[in-house]
Amino acid sequence: MKEIQRISITDAVVESMKELIESGEYEAGQKLPTEAKLCEMLKVSRTSVREAFRVLQALGYVVIKAGKGAFVAEKKPGLGEKALWYEADNVEFSDFMEVRYAVEPLGVRLAVERASEKQIAELSEIHDSFVEANAGHDMAKLIMLDELFHTKIMSCTKNPLLININKQLLDSFRMYRGESFMNTEVYGNAVIPHERILECFKRHDAEQAVLEMQRHLDITSEDMRHLHKMQ
């Protein structure tokens, strides 16, 4: 492992840990070194390591078990766990988007109707952190917070089936989310859509929230088409 020469941003720690996992030095299910050990290995602060673990968990590389530590995830990053409703191979970006267009507008409608003031405040805090990460070009944190924003919306629906379906969809969609946020031309395009959706929560305007979510998905689709044309 390459030593990080100074206290680095979270991205650098994340990349070092991904290198360890992808190289096979740590296998699926294996426990990763403790925070203290990683601080010593990478020459970074414990805060940086702790935040990197959260990002890696959001990206699907690790599983954090309370009181036990961090473990390499059993599944490969970007591939969702298969369930009875999801048994398809060779799924493409357009397939994911078609399902998102069905699930997320429904989710945001129910969420706006059912969210408590506390949940709306929590969603606002996530958005504030997202804006801050965008300003700092912290791509790894953007990926984590974008997923957290959409997950939080779905949790407000209080519908366990919808929450579970959305979780598996987000897990499977993660490779595309990473592709878009790691590109400097489109990484900031979610800020305004998120802000408009959040405003709908504050006004308790479910109908407008559905429209804003659809527009957000339109932008996501267009961004990915743009990226693929560049390749």
Image: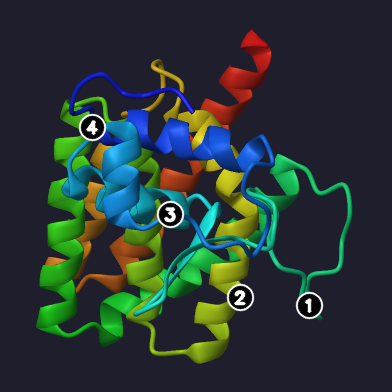
Mark 1 vs mark 3: in front = 3
Q: Which amino acid does label 1 sit on?
A: Trp
Residue named by callout 2: 165
Residue named by callout 1: 85
Q: Which of marks 4 and 2 is nearer the N terminus?
A: 4
Give residue 70's quadrant in the image.
bottom left
Kindly report the distance in space between the C-alpha atoms of the residues bearing marks 4 and 3: 30 Å
Kindly report the distance in space between the C-alpha atoms of the residues bearing marks 1 and 4: 35 Å
Q: Which amino acid does label 3 sit on?
A: Pro
Kindly report the distance in space between the C-alpha atoms of the residues bearing marks 1 and 2: 9 Å
Residue named by callout 3: 33
Q: Which amino acid does label 2 sit on?
A: Ile
Residue contact at pointers 1 and 2, CB within 8 angstroms: yes
Q: In which quarter of the image is the C terminus?
A: top right
Of residues 223 and 72, the one drawn nearer to the viewer in this rendering = 72
Q: Which mark is residue 134?
A: 4
Q: Which of marks 4 and 3 is nearer the N terminus?
A: 3
Residue 29 position in % (x across, y down) = 64, 65
Residue contact at pointers 2 and 3, CB within 8 angstroms: no
